[in-house]
Amino acid sequence: MSVKRIGVLTSGGDAPGMNAAVRAVVRACLYHGIECYGIRRGWNGLINGDVMKMDETKIAHTINRGGTILYTARSEEFMTEKGQKKAVSACKFLGLDSIIAIGGDGTFRGARALSRHGINVIGIPGTIDNDISCTNYCIGFDTAANTAIECIDRLRDTMQAHERCSVVEVMGRNAGYLAMYVGLAVGATAVLVPEKPVDFEKDVIEKIRQARFRGFTHYMIVVAEGAGSATDIAKKIHEAIDMEPRVTVLGHIQRGGSPTARDRVNATKMGYLAVELLLAGKNNRIVCTRHGDFIDVDIDKALEDTKRLQSMELDVMTAMTGLRDNA
């Protein structure tokens, strides 16, 4: 099939590096003589025909910008059969051969729904949660992790001066990849993630005690938002050992900021490969990274599995906090 006109959109939560991916898609299209249209506000924008023709001026100086120049939104209407048919009609009216969708799990489920109506789609994983099962890495994860690490390093300075316990809540929705990665990087006393059941006495209180026995007077507890509220965790610590923890919820600050080199380069490669896949006649795929290589996976297969935390990371965290699982 000849590819003449491609639509590109960003959907769901924004992630640093999305602009780099959009830029790569546009530049790859220009290189191959393909028209590229930016669809603003995700699937909702497609339904409403909110598009603009993309050229070099639209993507100039965007590789270093956080957020997304195409904006993003969640669309309940698109999740319905009626909404999907409206999106299909919009694609036909606009003459779009294919859609390149940048986002996370919800974005890809929307892309798969559209593909079942006969529209060719390519997905690019962009989410700070890093919870897409088919890929080792998602655009935005590295920047979000570095942002959280920088914030916690600064927080540690003042908390250590006052010999306090810090409970820091990081994003990740129902996935603990960001929290575990950040916890390892900052040398946390304990990390709570939704994938691992918590024995509060052993996993938090006893680790604080053991840290105190080793001479530490400041304790850093990192909590994934899906594992519970940092405020509730702090209250439980206070009730157990009469200590007044200080709570910090990093929140959406983790989504913003200029993307790291890793996010810029990976996003650029994924955007370029998405266009190359369409030119090669491949459809309904997701661009992925595995063991350092860039590959593509069928969208149905990609959404079958649930991503799991690496057992090695859990083992390392257990060892770094000084308590064995049978302690």
Image: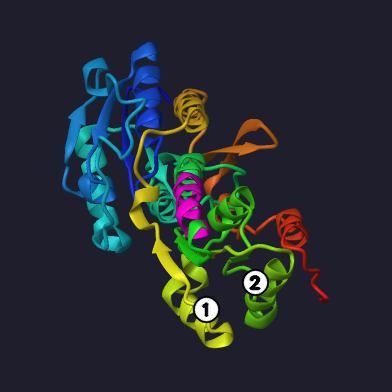
Q: In the rendered view, would you say 279 is above or below 220?
A: above
Task: Report crowding for label 2: few under 14, some 14 to 19, many 20 or more residues within 10 A (C-alpha).
Answer: many
Q: Position of residue 261 (x, y in %)?
A: 49, 27
Please identify the quarter of the rendering in which residue 219 is found: bottom right
Q: Position of residue 68 (x, y in %)?
A: 29, 38
Let me know if residue 158 is in the magenta part.
yes
* Label whose residue precedes the other's in the sequence (1 or 2): 2
Q: In the rendered image, which quarter contains the C terminus?
A: bottom right
Q: Main secondary structure of the magenta part?
A: helix
Q: Position of residue 51 (x, y in %)?
A: 19, 35
Q: In the rendered view, would you say 311 is above or below 88?
A: below
Label 1 residue SS = loop
Q: Nearer the viewer, residue 283 or 291?
A: 291
Please give the name of the residue rendered at 42% of the width and 51% of the height, measured from the top-left corner: 116
Task: Report crowding for label 1: few under 14, some 14 to 19, many 20 or more residues within 10 A (C-alpha).
Answer: some
Q: What residue type is disc 1 on?
A: Met
Please identify the quarter of the rendering in which residue 217 is found: bottom right
Q: In the rendered view, would you say 22 is above or below 13?
A: above
Q: Position of residue 49 (x, y in %)?
A: 17, 42
Which region shows up in magenta?
Answer: 149-160
Quickly name the residue at label 2.
Answer: 208
Quickly name the residue at label 1.
Answer: 243
Q: Is residue 290 left or right of residue 107?
A: right
Let me know if residue 248 is in the magenta part.
no
Q: Is residue 252 left or right of residue 139?
A: left
Please give the name of the residue rendered at 44% of the width and 58% of the height, measured from the top-left corner: 171
Q: What residue type is disc 2 on?
A: Ile
Q: In the rendered view, would you say 95 is above or below 168?
A: above
Label 1, label 2: how many angstroms apart (C-alpha)?
Answer: 10 Å
Q: Which label number is shown at residue 271?
A: none
